[in-house]
């Protein structure tokens, strides 16, 4: 079925922002403080991650302008490399790029609601209940989901601004040195924990490419898609650095170290116990926005997989309101299994390693695109070839330390790719043609 181009710049940008602003920013700081002692190094994690995300979004803007259709990496790599590579990218995006982050965000949301209700409601059932409600919404109606997405993104950003403003207004904040010394630079350049903690940061920035997954439904995609990717990524990068600075100013590091609900803890120091509970509820609402964004965008990737694997063609079917109902339900079903496993850090490591491979392949594809004279996209990245090379170098650094220090999650990611190859060879070769 041909896609209708009904989504504008506001929805596309809000989708980018909401996909990024989720459990990563509200959960990862405590784990980063376990491996890093320099607060300057912790803040630099978010700067480095933001620069990588911006480099990636610039490249995706050019790729999206050249191939303005749904599917993200699936769409790009099918056309730039081969149908098999494209299918594997779509497979990874569908199962690791969206279902796994939905599970991680849902787990974090459940923990925040658990703390906000004084421990009266158990976290895991809360996570499942919210997942079911969002699945019903996005499996029902595309425009209803889009309207909810715009509203929830506004609430999310306002919450972050409130936290930042409240922390900056503190009369006696915790000391957070912004001028680096020799020890700070040694920790950034010589501590492997800096590279492995980029897993958390890259997870928090996951979603900078979200608008590329719905390019086939955006009006004037050659013009609006690059704007949505770049504006959304720059906005989130600024918010992330400021919000982590705000958390560190509000609460002492010993209270944050190793804790999942850092937003709740910082809220307690900012507003007292009663205020912390309200902050937990508001952060849970913000996480709801992220879950909604991923439940909106991810099934659009699943729906594309049937183009190359006929057995999955049923995932592309839409109901009368334009929603890919079966794909939404399948993604949420996978997320539900991961929620039941309830291993938050393992899920994050799996996401970081596997998506680093997929996005690196897509970014490297811009070099192939530039060699095709028949394709002249309306948007071309600035600073070529430095921008894609910078992104690829950063991801190579992350993957190296990931294989070295987080081999279990890395092996899991490689197994997911191997399963995709098996499905392709069993079902995808018959009746499948290259692009």
Image: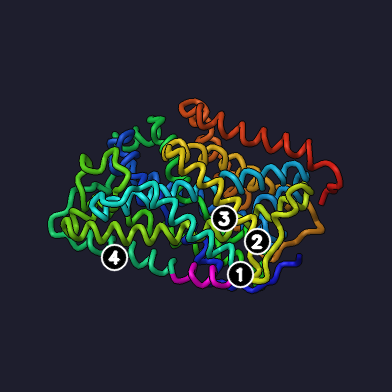
Image disc number at residue 162: 4
Mark 2 secondary-structure assignment: loop
Residue beneath disc 1: 224
Q: Marks 1 and 4, Cα distance to the nearest angstrom?
A: 29 Å
Image quarter hosting the N terminus: bottom right
User: Which residue is at the front of the view, 36 or 409?
Assistant: 409
Image disc number at residue 324: 2
Camera-side mark, 2 or 4: 2
First to last magenta residue range: 141-151
Q: Earlier in the sequence, mark 3 or mark 4?
A: 4
Q: Earlier in the sequence, mark 3 or mark 1?
A: 3
Q: Position of residue 296 (x, y in %)?
A: 56, 61
Q: Are marks 3 and 4 in contact (CB under 8 Å)?
A: no
Q: Is residue 351 magenta?
A: no
Residue beneath disc 3: 209
Camera-side mark, 1 or 2: 2
């Amino acid at each position: 079925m041909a896609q209708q181009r009904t989504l504008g710049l506001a929805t596309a940008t809000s989708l980018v922002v909401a996909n990024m602003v989720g459990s990563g920013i509200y959960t990862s700081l405590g784990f980063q403080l376990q491996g890093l002692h320099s607060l300057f190094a912790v803040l630099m994690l978010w700067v480095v991650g933001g620069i990588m995300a911006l480099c990636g979004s610039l490249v995706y803007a050019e790729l999206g302008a050249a191939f303005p259709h749904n599917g993200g990496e699936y769409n790009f790599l099918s056309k730039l490399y081969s149908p098999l590579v494209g299918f594997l990218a779509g497979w990874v995006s569908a199962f690791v790029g969206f279902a796994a982050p939905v599970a991680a965000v849902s787990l974090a949301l459940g923990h925040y609601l658990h703390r906000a209700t004084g421990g009266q409601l158990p976290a895991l059932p809360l996570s499942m209940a919210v997942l079911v409600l969002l699945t019903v919404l996005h499996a029902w109606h595309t425009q209803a989901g889009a309207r909810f997405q715009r509203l929830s993104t506004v609430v999310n950003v306002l919450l972050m601004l409130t936290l930042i403003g409240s922390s900056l207004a503190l009369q006696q904040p915790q000391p957070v040195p912004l001028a680096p010394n020799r020890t700070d630079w040694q920790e950034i350049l010589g501590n492997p924990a800096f590279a492995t903690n980029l897993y958390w940061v890259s997870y928090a920035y996951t979603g900078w490419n979200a608008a590329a997954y719905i390019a086939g439904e955006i009006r004037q995609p050659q013009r609006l898609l690059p704007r949505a990717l770049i504006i959304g990524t720059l906005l989130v990068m600024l918010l992330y650095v400021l919000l982590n600075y705000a958390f560190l100013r509000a609460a002492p590091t010993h209270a944050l170290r190793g804790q999942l609900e850092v937003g709740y803890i910082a809220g307690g120091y900012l507003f007292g116990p009663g205020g912390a509970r309200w902050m937990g509820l508001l952060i849970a609402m913000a996480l709801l926005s992220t879950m909604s964004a991923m439940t909106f965008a991810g099934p659009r990737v699943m729906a594309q997989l049937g183009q190359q694997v006929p057995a999955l063609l049923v995932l592309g079917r839409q109901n009368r309101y334009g929603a890919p109902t079966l794909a939404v339900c399948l993604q949420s079903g996978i997320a539900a299994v991961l929620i039941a496993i309830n291993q938050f850090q393992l899920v994050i490591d799996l996401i970081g390693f596997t998506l680093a491979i997929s996005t690196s392949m897509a970014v490297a594809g811009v070099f192939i695109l530039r060699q095709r004279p028949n394709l002249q996209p309306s948007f071309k990245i600035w600073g070529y070839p430095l921008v894609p090379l910078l992104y690829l170098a950063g991801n190579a650094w992350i993957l190296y330390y990931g294989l070295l220090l987080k081999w279990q999650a890395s092996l899991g990611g490689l197994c997911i790719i191997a399963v995709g190859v098996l499905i392709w060879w069993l079902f995808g070769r018959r009746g499948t043609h290259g692009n």
